[in-house]
Image (cartoon, grey):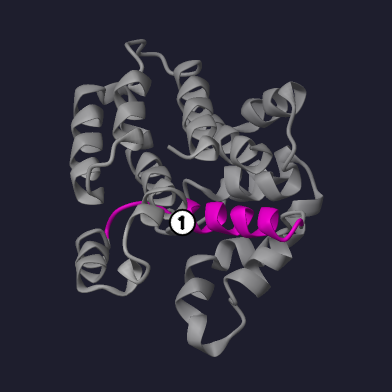
Amino acid sequence: MDNQVQYSLQAALENFAGLIDEKGPSPELSLLPIFDSDAPLMEKVGLMDTVFDDHAAYEELREVCFDLLLINFFLKDVKKLEEDYLESAEWEAIEEATLDRGTELLNVLLYIRECQEEDLEPELDDFLNEYLLVNEDEFQDEHRIYEAVIANRELADSDYKSIADAAAKVDKENELLELFYPLVSFFYEPHADDDHMAEFTENSQNKAFDAAVYGLLINFNHS
């Protein structure tokens, strides 16, 4: 299992557990062996889903965990496969089968990894313009998905309260509705300490989920 992914998963689960009303056993001990196994990706997905079926209190993190499982595959598992595996019919079938899985968080994680490889600090404008290419004609799907973030890109230089206020106004049908607050907050403060996290959580309308995602991003960025 990739260390970055492990630390991020553990941070997400810990932050989530600390803010939910329904206390119960954490799925961490069940999830870590799945991530670390040599099983095929789709088998891991099935096992992961079973864990979340058995830990209903953590349901909100199912698709976030899928994102982590997928990036773990890209960073670790794929190295054990044939060099052209990501161009194979098998991978194409996996992509087709998982079209409705995961969140846009995967894009942010891949971007952070790219920044680390190039020794760059993550920045919202760079993420939108250079990574997602939202201004290019052939990437208008990305422009549509990230429209609310694009319209509020100046918030990366504001504060948690301003970001939270903007998040409350995001259209309920927007694909980034749930991720808007932690995503933009990450680009506002990608090196959050405990005081930052407390302020972030205080302004959140969905404290457990937001703290889980923000903690995940912070840890992935620091690993």
Examine the image and state in which quarter residue 134 appears: bottom right
Q: Up-down: is 91 above or below 69?
A: below
Is 176 displayed left or right of 161 in the figure?
A: left
Is 186 displayed left or right of 45 in the figure?
A: right
User: What segment is highlighted magenta in the picture?
Assistant: 100-119
Where residue 77 sits in the image (x, y, percent)? 37, 49
Determine if the magenta segment contains residue 115: yes
**Measuring 40% from the left and 14% from the top, which residue is drawn there?**
21
Kind of element beneath mark 1: loop
Is 208 displayed left or right of 21 in the figure?
A: right
Task: Please state which of residues 37 and 161 is positioned toward the viewer in this rendering.
Answer: 37
- Report how many numbered discs are placed on residues in the image: 1
Identify the residue under disc 1. Answer: 104
Task: Please state which of residues 89 and 163 is positioned toward the viewer in this rendering.
Answer: 89
- The quarter of the image holding the C terminus is top right
Examine the image and state in which quarter residue 132 appears: bottom right
